[in-house]
Amino acid sequence: MHNKTIAELSTGLKDKQFSSEELTRHFLDRVKRLDHKLNCFITLTEDVALEQAKRSDKILQNGDAHPLTGIPVAQKDIFCTKNIKTSCGSKMLDNFYSPYDATVIEKMSDAGAVLLGKTNMDEFAMGSSNETSFYGPVKNPWDLHTVPGGSSGGSAAAVAARIAPAATGTDTGGSIRQPAALCGVTGLKPTYGRVSRYGMIAFASSLDQAGPLTQSAEDAAIILSAMAGFDTRDSTSTDIAVPDYTSTLANNISGLKIGIPKEYFSNALESGVQSAVQDALKEYEKLGAKLIDIELPNSGLSVPTYYVVAPAECSSNLSRFDGVRYGYRCDNPANLEDLYKRSRGEGFGQEVKRRIMIGTYALSAGYYDAYYLKAQRLRRLISNDFSAAFKKVDVIMGPTTPTTAFKIGEKTNDPITMYLSDVYTIAVNLAGLPGISIPAGFSDNKPVGLQLIGNYFEEAKILNAAHQYQLVTNWHRQIPDAFS
Amino acid sequence: MQWESVIGLEIHTQLATRSKIFSGASTVYGAEANTQACVVDLGMPGTLPVLNTEAVRMAVKFGLAIGAHIAPRSIFARKNYFYPDLPKGYQISQMELPIVGKGQIDIELDGEQTKTIGITRAHLEEDAGKSLHEDFHGMSGIDLNRAGTPLLEIVSEPDMRSATEAVAYMRKIHSLVQYLEICDGNMQEGSFRCDANVSIRRKGQKKLGTRAELKNINSFRFVERAINYEIERQIDILEGGGKVIQETRLYDSDNNTTRAMRSKEEANDYRYFPDPDLLPVDLEEAYIDQIKQTLPELPNEKKKRFISDFGLSAYDASTLTSSKPMADYYEAVVKASGNEAKLSANWVIGELSGALNKANLNIKDTSVNEKMLGGMIKRIADNTISGKIAKQVFEAMWNNEGEADAIIESKGLKQVTDSGAIEKIIDDIIAANPTQLEQYRTGKDKLFSFFVGQTMKQTQGKANPKQVNDILKKKLNP
């Protein structure tokens, strides 16, 4: 059962080949048997999962099932789940049981999905390798010595190893697409505002967006159709009707204009990644698409811009973790200042503290104009590049990451190099556009991701293009030997 | 040395919305601690603010009432600082683009004189919770019921030159926000409180002196005392050759002093930046126009109308329009009295206000309603009772003994207007007091009132005073 996509499992459930309870037990069993190698899960929600599976079986019996009804899905531990530990990968929230459900959790539950568990992640989603998690690093199922990417590394690795049929993630600078690329799965970051952020623990509010990590574009379309939508509890969510993303997957893409940004094929790009991406683009040509060279002249500014905006917002967003109302509190605080200093000093890890300090600095009196305001101006320039490009092309394609999965520990002492692994994904967040990474072959036996970037709210278009590619290739069907 | 004090106020007005500015929790005062704080108010991870549009409407109302520019686009910003009763570690406020821009208001000084005070801006923000330092041995309690209550912070120009002016300005704003029905004005519950910026300079000097900010004062009396104390303190420092330092000070009402809280050096860098969780507030002209239509008659307009329609003095009109309940009450009394505007004004300002003050009651809680007082004034006007007897009637009404007519009847307070009867009584009095009559007639005019007194005494005050006067004049000066 574990090598089937959601679409296939859904058919199996409806045809009574197996029940949701059987399916759920199967995946619970796989997690128990295999996850010690990977460390994908922070919490396995066995009781909730079985209860929801039984509920789903009743709905399936009645015949009014959603495509997600009865399908176990792993949720990134950044989404608040009522009465279930919600750690955000941090010691700070190791004791935190949310009193409410995130909108994403509610919507997935309403669609009938079964909560399998909460997945490991970089602490507060700050990281590109899953090494900043308080719960230890996640390993890449393709090579246990390498990282799965981050911050949604637990989700990506769980889907790659097929210990979960699908998972959710969040993407602030590439945190869905980069681990999807490194683990050889499909990962979609929707347009900013497409999915409610309510109940998703904030890293950088103007960049954060939730999305699915799946085996295929079709599965991503199924989950996005359930996750997306306007939410009165999130002022930044957009009131635009959610289409059925599966209904346009079969559209012919002949004549599709694909923009190829020359800036994404520079020297920084590993040759193995480059040739896999070139091969993928050739497939698109075979499907009738046209490749058009474009320029995104300000792409080089993305990483520095991001590392002002995101830390600035995070420094403020993480102020609420003060040891007063919930979360970690230091032992025997001497006074208020001691309570703050030690609770935060002991509760947060290195990378989180680094970013809080960068952000605090960037917002400080006397530096605000030079850093924060300037970064906001650059952000507009970066967005303008994309707007200009989308006047000429339908989608933009390139590599998701400059390299394949790197070794655990390889970049932990060099934050700048680590930050550069998101060089192709960050601009998409700064502009608020949708992007998807799909498996496009291997380099040195490690997966390579192809990134498709769409115009605002054109998730349907990139899902369609991704699906058409997956109809003629089988990279997305590959499973690491140890987990097949 | 002649010193001039320069004062500006920042008034924090709690807006009378039913729910909080960024959450659906109730704003009702006095609930059990932390029972009116939802996950958003508690700053739970993942929660997001959603703007209460009612707070925006109220802010616009205020802006229009002070003739201010209403910003077509205003922006919420985060003011970052750590405090246990600030759940998110930042307060959502407005910094660069406040909703209400420059406006102004006239204040009354000594009745007739007015002065225009500039208002720099007014912006929306959320209130913090409360730290409770008593009742928790060695610890502090936090009550987050107030967290997220909408505030309109009204910032004045440094246009006031004395504590008296500052209080007059604060009273004027206090009255205005109640007229507009955007704040309940309850100062004891903290719905209306202020910070005062105080500095002094030599008379004639243009440059402003270094200011001290007096924090969180919640009564008119304390504002006056705190500012006066602060002015004296600063004069003492400067005359002693010292320097005033810029700092935040706290008024201690028990000792009538101010003491330093923190200096500028220790002040927080609030690291303001636009709140990415909230969209800019874009207001269309039609929306602002529509609010303009709903504005009630404002104190100044009402005052003018009272002067022209009721023939009141500027002083009386000011007093009666100083609060909307008072003005409404007065107008209802005029109506019930059969348009006895001047007499009604005297009674509302005099007897009624005096009784309310004495009993420490609000006009809304008076036992003498508009109809009762109007009914009594009607009886004064039609000579059924004299003004003096009316005081007895009023007291009886105040003590819940019924309406004026019933009291007049049951106590037999009806005025004696029978000239013959009064003449007879006066004749008897003159006959019984030959010495006084002799003295009066030889020039001791003062004794006239002796005869009036005697007459009133005989009639238990019920004789019509005008008739008594007329008859006495005739009889004493043949």
Image: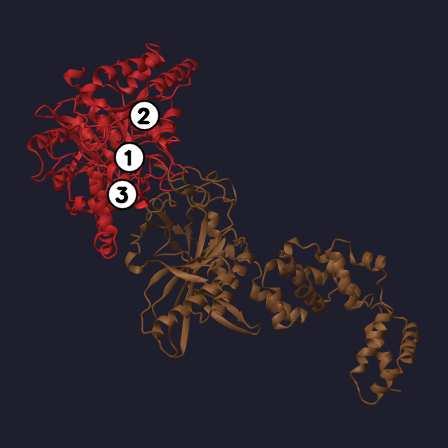
Chain colours: A red, B brown
Q: Nearer the viewer, mark 3 or mark 1?
A: 3
Question: Mark 1 sits on what residue?
Answer: A92
Q: CA distance from mark 3 to mark 2?
A: 45 Å
Is label 2 in contact with label 1 (beta carbons under 8 Å)?
no
- The percent coordinates of residue B24 (x first, y second) are 46, 40
Which chain letter goes with mark 2? Answer: A
Which amino acid type corresponds to the residue marked 2 in the rendered image? Ile
Label 2 crowd (10 A; few <14 / some 14-19 / many >=20)? many
State left or right for residue A211 relative to residue B37: left
State left or right for residue A148 relative to residue A231: left
Sequence order check: which comes first, mark 3 or mark 1? 1
Q: CA distance from mark 3 to mark 1?
A: 13 Å
B105 or B270, which is in the foreground? B270
**Helix, strand, or loop for circle 3?**
helix
- The percent coordinates of residue A451 (x first, y second) are 19, 33
Q: CA distance from mark 2 to mark 1?
A: 34 Å
Q: How many marks overall? A: 3
Sequence order check: which comes first, mark 3 or mark 2? 2
Which amino acid type corresponds to the residue marked 1 in the rendered image? Met
Asked if both marks, 3 and 1, belong to the same chain, the answer given is yes
Q: Which mark is residue A222?
A: 2
Quarter location, residue A454: top left
As displayed, is residue B5 above or below residue A379? below
Q: Residue at x 13, y 27 (%)?
A: A146
A164 or A238, which is in the foreground? A164
Q: Which mark is residue A341?
A: 3
Q: Is residue A189 visible?
A: no
As displayed, is residue A197 above or below residue A118? below
Which amino acid type corresponds to the residue marked 3 in the rendered image? Lys
**Helix, strand, or loop for circle 1?**
helix
As displayed, is residue A111 above or below residue A128? above
